[in-house]
Image: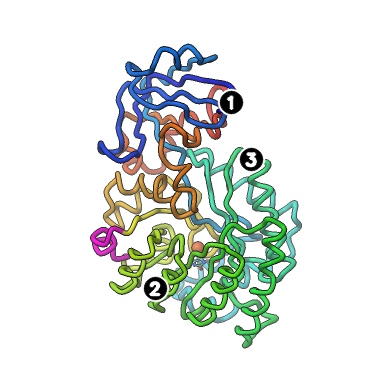
């Protein structure tokens, strides 16, 4: 390890490491070296030799400290908005009807294609900044509003640029199989063949960390999804899936066959899907913002997921159609109120399990020596308050990769 050594002391650490509830350590300290955590524990147990190496010592005044939050499912890069469709839905139209009539995802594709790279970057980085202000240090960004070789690449480049220019870790997911673009109307198989053919080039340019698809009655069939996944597997890319959101297509079992990192949404998941996910070690990513905004009533099968030991993550699903929110903390609250997660499960869902859903389970999501120094100090006494308040931002300071990005020294 190398780089500046800083001791962050006088903190109440919710490390989220296994053992005590929340991995709680009172009167804790974090020794940061470069971008990594060198030592984590009760301050009284910090070895003197290590303490002496600290060039700076910063008191957190007893604040609660958690791992940096991880938003493991977002569609942050797009043009325009869909406030008019929101009105139409309030007047009685369904998400499904709007999508089938050519609105929905396809209207955002049109707005994205006419936006310049600069406009896409500016808007997406402003959205990322809102998430970061609430303690988010890692996000996933999906493509899926370009839907052509040129425009998918453009959106993924914007996502990569966010990771380069903002103090934020960004994982990029190709979601070309999000909707059928108008130039392929009535030819979904041809579109999937084309989307599979773009993948090697996107990967060669370093734009893809994972491949996702939307498998549903208004999107792609399991057979088409399988073709996308085979292309991903051929390139050694991990897969994830928008599965069982609006109907049960048995997409989760299909994704599990490919060892999916995660299956997301899951309102219509059945027990076979749960078993398959458990066997594959796939994370269940729940998206309460979309559930809320589409006024869904069917809740994902949480007791079944728990019983089977499927790790549960929570994400914003930020997108202009089904979840235009930018508060991961609000998602914690909604995961508890709508889905009956415990506040501790909800926090694990945006730390430990969200890291796992992005393939970052060994390095991110817990406060532990050797892992990334990504953490947040909150103006809170207890970790269950994170899921309790809503419409309030108690974030005091954020350290990402060892560097303060929010707070007095940022
Ligand atoms: N499911 C969703 O909820 C989003 N994408 C998806 O596959 C919605 C995207 C949109 O409506 O623009
Ligand atoms: Fe999504």
Q: Which sits earlier in the primary sequence, circle 2 or circle 1?
A: 1
Give the SS element for disc 2. helix
Q: Is residue 345 visible?
A: yes
Q: Tell me if 350 is positioned left or right of 172 in this view.
A: left
Question: Looking at the image, which residue is at 26% across and 38% down?
Answer: 19
Look at the magenta stretch and give its main secondary structure.
helix
Choose mark 2 or mark 1, whichever is in front: 1
Q: Position of residue 172 (x, y in %)?
A: 60, 55
Q: Which sits earlier in the primary sequence, circle 3 or circle 1?
A: 1
Q: Quadrant of residue 108?
A: bottom right
How far apart, in angstroms, are the residues tagged by discs 2 and 1? 44 Å
How many C-alpha atoms fall within 10 Å of the one at disc 2: few (<14), some, or many (≥20)? many
Question: Looking at the image, which residue is at 54% across and 29% down?
Answer: 402
Residue receiving disc 3:
166
Give the SS element for disc 3. loop
Whether the residues at callouts 3 and 2 have beta carbons within 8 Å, the answer is: no
Whether residue 38 is situated above or below residue 197 in the rendered picture:
above
Residue receiving disc 2:
253
Whether residue 323 is situated above or below residue 401 in the rendered picture:
below
Q: Determine which of the numbered discs, if any, sits on residue 2 in the image.
A: 1
How far apart, in angstroms, are the residues tagged by discs 3 and 2? 36 Å
How many C-alpha atoms fall within 10 Å of the one at disc 3: few (<14), some, or many (≥20)? some
Q: Is residue 403 visible?
A: no
How far apart, in angstroms, are the residues tagged by discs 3 and 1? 22 Å
Whether residue 405 is situated above or below residue 339 in the rendered picture:
above
Choose mark 3 or mark 1, whichever is in front: 1
Tell me which segment is drawn in magenta.
Answer: 300-309
Looking at the picture, tell me which residue is in the foreground, 91 or 1: 1
Whether residue 185 is situated above or below residue 364 in the rendered picture:
below
Whether the residues at callouts 3 and 1 have beta carbons within 8 Å, the answer is: no
Q: Tell me if 154 is positioned left or right of 323 in this view.
A: right
Q: Position of residue 408 (x, y in %)?
A: 54, 22
């Amino acid at each position: 390890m190398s780089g500046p050594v800083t001791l962050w002391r006088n903190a109440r650490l919710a490390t989220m490491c296994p053992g005590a509830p929340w991995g709680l350590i009172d009167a804790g300290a974090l020794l940061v070296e470069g971008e990594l955590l060198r030592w984590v524990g009760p301050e009284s147990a910090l070895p003197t030799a290590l303490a002496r190496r600290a060039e700076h010592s910063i008191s957190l005044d007893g604040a609660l400290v958690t791992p940096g939050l991880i938003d493991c499912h977002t569609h942050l890069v797009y043009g325009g908005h869909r406030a008019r469709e929101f009105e139409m839905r309030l007047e009685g139209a369904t998400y499904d009807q709007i999508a089938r009539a050519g609105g929905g995802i396809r209207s955002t594709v049109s707005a994205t294609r006419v936006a310049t790279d600069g406009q896409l970057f500016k808007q997406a980085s402003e959205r990322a900044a809102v998430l970061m202000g609430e303690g988010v240090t890692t996000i996933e960004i999906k493509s899926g509003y370009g839907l052509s070789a040129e425009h998918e690449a453009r959106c993924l480049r914007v996502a990569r640029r966010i990771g380069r220019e903002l103090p934020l870790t960004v994982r990029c997911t190709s979601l070309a199989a999000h909707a059928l673009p108008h130039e392929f109307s009535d030819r979904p198989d041809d579109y999937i063949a084309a989307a599979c053919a773009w993948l090697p080039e996107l990967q060669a340019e370093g734009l893809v960390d994972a491949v996702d698809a939307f498998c549903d009655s208004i999107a792609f069939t399991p057979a088409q999804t399988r073709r996308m996944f085979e292309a991903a597997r051929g390139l050694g890319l991990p897969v994830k899936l928008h599965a069982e959101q609006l109907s049960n297509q048995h997409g989760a079992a299909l994704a599990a066959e490919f060892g999916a990192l995660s299956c997301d949404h899951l309102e219509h998941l059945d027990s076979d899907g749960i078993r398959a996910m458990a066997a594959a070690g796939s994370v269940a990513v729940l998206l309460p913002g979309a559930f809320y905004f589409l006024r869904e009533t069917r809740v994902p099968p949480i007791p079944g997921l728990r019983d089977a030991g499927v790790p549960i993550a929570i994400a914003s699903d930020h997108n202009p159609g089904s979840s235009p929110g930018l508060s991961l903390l609000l998602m914690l609250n909604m995961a508890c109120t709508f889905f009956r997660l415990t506040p501790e499960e909800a926090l694990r869902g945006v730390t430990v399990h969200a890291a796992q859903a992005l393939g970052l389970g060994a390095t991110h999501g817990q406060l532990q020596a050797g892992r990334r120094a990504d953490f947040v100090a909150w103006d809170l006494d207890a970790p269950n308050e994170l899921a309790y308040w809503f419409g309030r931002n108690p974030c005091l300071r954020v350290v990402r990769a060892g560097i303060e990005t929010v707070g007095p020294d940022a």
